[in-house]
Structure formats: C-alpha cells, structure tokens
C-alpha cells in the first residue's frame, strides 16, 4: 500500500462518505452510488420522454418539446439534466454550491455517464465550459460548483475543461426573478476571454436549469465568437409539461 492509499484510508475514517441527499454516513454497500437506501426512492434521474431541446422530463411521448421550449427559442443546440430538482436533490445541490461538498459532483458525473454517455459521445464536444461565477462570489466561496462538476465529468470523458467564459457582472440571484427579468438580469453579464481557444462544439456545465436564461446568455456570446454548436449538461433540472 502506497502513501496515497494510506492517506485515503485515513481520510475515509476521519471523514466517512455521506449520502448526497440526507447527509447521513453511508453503509459500505451504499458508498459506490453515494446515495443511502432511504433517499434512493426519492432521488430521480431524468428519464425519457425528454424535451428534445432543453432536456426536461415530460409526460407525453407524442410531444417533442416542453411547454417552455414550445413558446420560445434557445441559443443552445440541446441540453440534458442528470437529476430532477426535487426532494433530497435540492439539499444536495445546496451543499455542493455552498457547503464545499465536492463529492456530490462525482455522483452527478457518474450518473451523467450512465444516462448520457452515448449522447456526450455523439455530440463530440471539444471542450467543457463551466458556467462562471463572479470573482466576488469566487473569493467568498472559494470555488465554483459548476467548475467542480466540469472537472468531475472531464475525468470520466477525457474532454478538457476550458473556462473561456468569465462573469463580468455580479448579478442578482436568478431564483429571485421572474423569467422575463432573468434574461434582462444577465444582459452583458458574461464575456469570452480574449485569449479563448477556438472550438466548434462546446458543452456548457451548470448546476441547475430552470428557464435556461444563464446558459442562453453564455451560448449567445459563444456563438457570436464563432462556436458552431453549444450543448448543455446540468446537475439538476425542473420538470417539464
């Protein structure tokens, strides 16, 4: 056993793996999934039928799009969500965003590969781009949850993480705004770095998808800079209708 393995074992003794949903210590047989037996029935990976645009789970096989995508255009080509944003996943995403629980990103990346590994391979993204946070939030929090998720997915796919987008405005929290005000709130909030590498296909990573205002804003500026196709993957997504 090498030094790294010894340190890893000591770390697990001092900080045993916990359920991403309820934060209880996991039994040995639960550690691979990261979800305890009590939370498992309440945590739902997104399943077909899906909106062919944003990836929300819808409830009619004869519908191509959710109600939102039926009524407005998006700048991105297509998106997919890993888990439904409900039940224990709401607390899981809060811990990932504010509690430095980066292991939750590993669970999300593993589920993403199970559900969307073929989809990711088919779109052939050349780079993974995390939704950026403003430097004030980055200094306060110490990390960007979308970048942590992007790095977890990169380790599983081999696709490089390239943070070519930066956030120039410290905007109001999107959850406090109406759908109409969300888009206005993000106007001129992002820019592509001047030394950004040129790609043709990009996969944006974000933690939660609601109306798509954030990924639309980023997709728009990437397309303006010459990106041909922008796809999105989110840790959680709301239900579609």
Image (cartoon, helix red, strand yellow):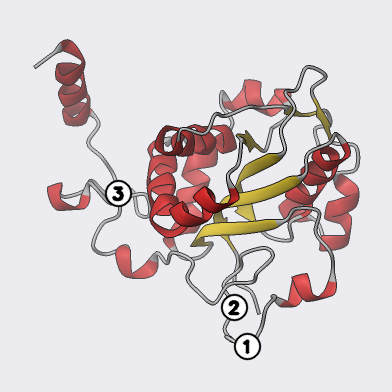
Q: Between tags 3 and 2, which lies in front? A: 2
Determine the image quadrant of residue 199. top right
- Badge 2 marks a residue whose secondary structure is loop
Which callout, 2 or 1, points to the residue nearer the camera?
Answer: 1
Sequence-wise first label, 3 or 2? 3
Position of residue 146 measured from the top left corner of the image (x, y, whole percent): 58, 38
Residue found at the very far top of the displayed protein: 3
Which residue is under mark 3? 34
Between the residue at mark 3 and the residue at mark 2, the CA separation in whole angstroms equals 26 Å
Residue at the spot 72% in from the left edge and 38% down from the top edge: 200
User: Residue 76 or 179: which is nearer the viewer?
Assistant: 76
Say what secondary structure mark 1 lies in: loop
State how far apart marks 3 and 1 are (Cα): 35 Å
The residue that disc 2 covers is 58
Q: Is residue 162 above or below residue 157?
A: above
Reading the chain from its start, which is encountered first: label 3 or label 1? 3
- Residue 51 appears at what percent x and percent y? 64, 71
Residue 96 placement, left or right of 241: left
Residue 43 quadrant = bottom left
Residue ID at (13%, 47%): 28
Along the horizontal axis of the image, is 214 left or right of 23?
Answer: right
Picture quarter with the N terminus? top left
Residue 172 visible at all: no
- Residue bearing the label numbered 1: 62
Which of these two is toward me, 95 or 196?
Answer: 196
Residue at horizontal 84 percent and vertical 45 percent from the top: 220
- Tell me the mark number nearer the camera, choosing from 3 and 1: 1
Image position of 239 with respect to 135: above or below? below
């Amino acid at each position: 056993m090498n030094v790294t393995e010894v340190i890893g074992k000591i770390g697990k003794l001092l900080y045993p793996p916990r359920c991403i949903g309820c934060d209880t210590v996991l039994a040995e047989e639960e550690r691979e999934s990261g979800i305890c037996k009590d939370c498992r029935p309440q945590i739902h990976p997104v399943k077909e039928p899906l909106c062919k645009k944003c990836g929300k789970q819808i409830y009619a096989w004869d519908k191509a799009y959710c109600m939102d995508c039926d009524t407005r255009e998006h700048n991105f080509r297509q998106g997919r969500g890993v888990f439904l944003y409900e039940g224990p996943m709401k607390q899981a995403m809060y811990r990932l965003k504010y509690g430095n629980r980066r292991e939750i990103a590993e669970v999300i990346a593993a589920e993403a590969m199970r559900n969307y590994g073929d989809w990711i391979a088919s779109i052939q993204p050349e780079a993974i781009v995390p939704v950026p946070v403003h430097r004030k939030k980055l200094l306060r929090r110490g990390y960007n949850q979308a970048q942590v998720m992007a790095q977890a997915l990169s380790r599983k796919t081999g696709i490089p993480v390239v943070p070519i987008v930066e956030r120039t405005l410290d905007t109001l929290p999107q959850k406090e705004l109406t759908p109409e005000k969300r888009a206005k709130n993000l106007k001129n909030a992002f820019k592509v770095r001047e030394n950004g590498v040129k790609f043709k296909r990009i996969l944006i990573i974000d933690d939660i998808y609601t109306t798509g205002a954030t990924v639309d804003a980023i997709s728009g500026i990437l397309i303006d800079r010459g990106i041909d196709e922008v796809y999105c993957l989110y840790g959680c997504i709301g239900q579609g209708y």
